[in-house]
Amino acid sequence: MLSVEGLEVRYAHRDGALRAVDGVDLTVGRGETVGLVGESGCGKSTLGKAILRLVEPIGGRVAIDGVDVAGLKGDRLLAFRRRVQFVFQDPYASLNPRRTIGEILDGALAVHRLGDRPTRRHRVREILDRVGLPADAVDRLPHEFSGGQRQRIGIARALVLSPDLIVLDEPVSALDVSIQAQILNLLVDLKREFGLAYLFVSHDLSVVRYIADRVLVMYLGRIVECADHHVLFGEPRHPYTRALVDAVPLPDPRRPRAAIVAGDIPSAARPPSGCRFHPRCPLAIGRCADEVPSMREIAPGHAVACHLA
């Protein structure tokens, strides 16, 4: 359903152009949940926003059912954004503090010209009930809700337009663990009920392991590994993926402490030559510093950008 090819996003930087997203390819099928993981600052959120053109890419192609999004304008762009919605990381900053929840959700329907006022009002109440919020939420302001409730409102705002795909940018990172579980279970139920597809952005591998069907690992603007979630967490083949998986804390005092990856993350304005992970990689050889590894399939559905995989 969603196809991204060679996507590039640059930001102005004092040291030159910062390569936030640098030639990313990915696909999301109907009803599929694709997890996107990596350290903070690797470009995950920018990639999600570029797919919806909330930030404009400078290169590459984003297509929905084969239609290039870059050429869409006016009503055609509006129709695309109805099909692909976004849930932001901060469940408070993403809501207008001066508008009631009913006005926020009704505003989305009004922009897309979906029904008259009574029809929209009924739809808003229906969706709020589906995400577990009380009927009187329509007349209340965002500050009157807890963090978990506000994230439910963000999900409702995306869901009210009946999208096919939702990009979720760290949707549970600001929530307590017990509330995280509630929101994740809600997302699983909604996916099953409405046939949704998700691009789930997170740095929390345990969350991604629970919800994702397939996982992409991103490092410094590029995808370095892609596999089914069982395979990726059971047999990670890229050294960076192995480091991420090993760093997940487990409640077992007998488990050896994970090895810490040496060095700091390089600047995306001045990325290393060759493989971008080679300055920190314990397995790096001379070829890694000189030659950019291509993404190659090492098993059905399992691709890695590493010379040694």
Image (cartoon, rainbow, N blue to C red):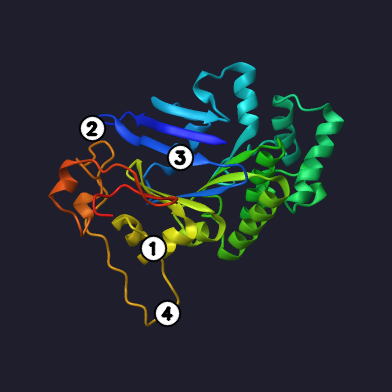
- Secondary structure beneath disc 2? loop
Report which residue position mark 3 lands on. Answer: 26
Report which residue position mark 1 lands on. Answer: 235
Around disc 1, counting alpha carbons within 10 Å, would you say few (fewer than 14), some (14 to 19), or many (20 or more)? few
Mark drawn on residue 105: none
Mark drawn on residue 252: 4
Quadrant (top left, top right, bottom left, bottom right) of the C terminus: bottom left
For marks 1 and 4, the one nearer the N-term is 1
- Secondary structure beneath disc 1? loop
Q: Residue at x 63, y 24 (%)?
A: 78
Looking at numbered disc 4 in the image, what kind of residue is underneath it? Asp
* Label 2, label 1: how far apart the Cα atoms are: 38 Å
Looking at numbered disc 3 in the image, what kind of residue is underneath it? Leu
Which mark's residue is nearer the viewer, 1 or 4?
A: 1
Q: Quick check: can you spot residue 146? A: no
- Secondary structure beneath disc 4? loop
